[in-house]
Image: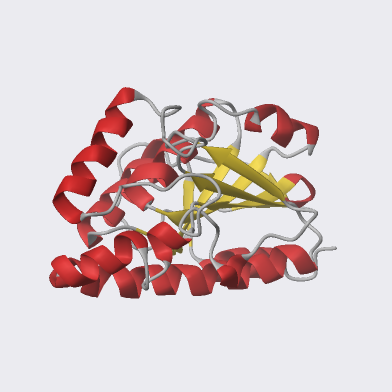
Amino acid sequence: MTASHTDSPKSLTNWIMPWPEFEIDWSRTGLMVIDLQNYSSNPECGIAEMISSQYPDVAEHYISSIQKAVANTQVLLTAFRQAQREVIFTRHGALLPDGRDMILRRQRRDTDAIHQTEQPALWSKGSFEHDILEALQPRPDELVIDKNASSPFNGTGIDQLLRNLNLDTLIMAGMATDMCVETTARDAADRGYNVVVIEDATATFFAEHHHAALSSLARVYTKVWLTEDILGQLTGIR
């Protein structure tokens, strides 16, 4: 079963150039859940906890946005699992406890973050903060990719793994819209994947950055849909 979606994203202004256009073969489509980890998306620890205590104005938007994104990602997970479609998770952070596997710029960023906020910007593999949110825990038969860069296409074997899984379309949810989600979406699109980014299943710290990232992606690289658009397409697919 294939589907096409030619309308421009509802929340974005009109555009003089053609919107990205492709057909979706749902038998070759997977859900990619990007970096919805405790450090980024659990209000009780990591970045969210720090922002709540030091930048309450930012936290007011961010916490509510991430909670909405997580709730919609749960809905998407249920739908993809019921439809027996592939689900892939990514986790962002250092692969070694001391972070020396990270590029120097990221190592320096963590050092600066600790000085300014008493917490690193990222956490290493094996820590509670690095783990995926309990509400979104992967199943044993679902792929989890650990990455120490913004995009899993840089530094991991995900491209080969996705092709082994016979996937050509990726539905993306996660955090942060203007950082790891946007970078991953661009990388995937440039490698020939069809990409759909879910507007209400992604979040970042500032509303204007969320909108700008989706606007940039929608004009050249990806489709931007809502959760309900995906559910409407997946209904009845087995």
Residue at 42% from the left image edge and 68% from the top image edge: 42
Q: Is residue 138 shown above or below 18?
A: below
Whether 195 is drawn above or below 131: the answer is: above
Task: State the count of labels.
Answer: 0
**Place of residue 150 in the rendered image (x, y in percent of width and height, measured from the top left):** 42, 37
The front one of 43 and 188 is: 43
Q: Colour mode? A: secondary structure
Q: Residue furthest right?
A: 238
Q: Nearer the viewer, residue 18 or 62?
A: 62
x 14%, y 71%: residue: 57
| Res. 203 in view | yes
Residue at the front extreme, as displayed: 98
Q: Picture coordinates of residue 215 (x, y %)?
A: 32, 48
Q: Look at the picture and state if 17 lies above or below 9.
A: above
Q: In this view of the protein, can residue 7 be seen by the observer? A: no
Foreground: 222 or 46? 46
Q: Residue 109 is drawn in which quadrant?
A: top left
Q: Residue drawn at (55%, 59%), measured in percent from left and top?
A: 132
- Quadrant where the C terminus sits is bottom right
Q: Position of residue 172 (x, y in %)?
A: 54, 51
- In the figure, residue 65 lies in which quadrant? bottom left
**In the image: residue 67, left or right of residue 231:** left
Q: Quadrant of residue 51?
A: bottom left
